[in-house]
Amino acid sequence: MTRSSGIEARRKVLLVDDDAVSLELMALLLAHEGHQVVRASNAGTALELLSDQSARPDVLLVDLQMPGVSGGQLAEKVRAMGGPGPLLLAMSASEVQHQQLLAFDGFLLKPLAVDDLRRALTPQRRGRKPGVRVAHPGRTEARTLAGVALDMSVIKKLLAMMPKEALVELFSACIADTRSCIRDLQNYMQQGGGNDDGVRPLAHRIKGAASMVGAVRLAQLAANL
């Protein structure tokens, strides 16, 4: 993986994601590409940062499925601010419908592919929006990795961005967060939970973090749930 070259290629990116593991990994990826990263763990914090005209980012990269104010609702609020706003990019580890992306300039799948990220952040010709890639990656890769716990290509990319000790800490954080989600799922079911409202956010959180670290088997289990 190579760092972006040239000052003109660098962007100030406001990164918004409620999942701490995904937020950390994506911030590392963006910084590794030479971009300045500002983090927000929810839409409220992002809006506070965006209200400062002197510190407005060039790009808003936001997870679509966040509790409370969703990524799509945040994008609509940013559009309503008027003036020259940031490039609005959505991201998700799940398949999305085109109508979910109407307020955005582009869409990226998690785990973020470096080439997709570079294309999305490349300046476009006036009046031309970045491409919106809605379909989830082809099932060929999923079949190739069937039964595999870890995607080693993802691990290699992560090792190119951080020392081995930092990667171990990242996996430890992912494991701890997954265990916390599992406990919450168990408590929810024991208390008589019987609909998607309590299960879906926790399963999505597990899937997002697992996808980012290449834990493909765990991500698939969460997706099935």
Image (tube, rainbow, N blue to C red):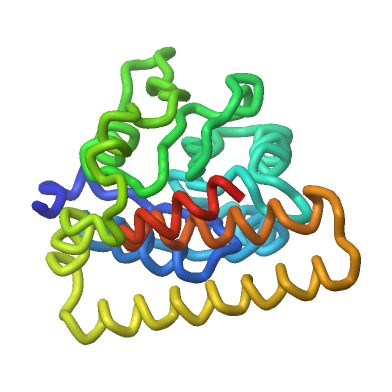
- Give the quarter of the image for residue 8: top left
Residue 16, image x and y in percent?
55, 56
The residue positioned 13% from the left and 65% from the top of the image is 160
Relative to 9, does residue 101 appear above or below in the rendering?
Answer: above
Residue 46, image x and y in percent?
63, 58
Q: Foreground: 42 or 150?
A: 150
Residue 221, image x and y in percent?
50, 54
Q: Foreground: 172 or 92?
A: 172
Q: How many numbered badges does the structure rendering display?
A: 0
The residue positioned 27% from the left and 29% from the top of the image is 140
The residue positioned 27% from the left and 43% from the top of the image is 113
Q: Residue furthest top?
A: 127
Q: Foreground: 80 or 165?
A: 165
> In the shown orientation, is residue 85 left or right of residue 131?
right
The residue positioned 49% from the left and 55% from the top of the image is 208
Q: Foreground: 158 or 45?
A: 158
Residue 90, image x and y in percent?
52, 38
Relative to 150, does residue 20 appear above or below in the rendering?
Answer: below
> In the shown orientation, is residue 131 left or right of residue 42?
left
Q: Residue furthest front?
A: 147
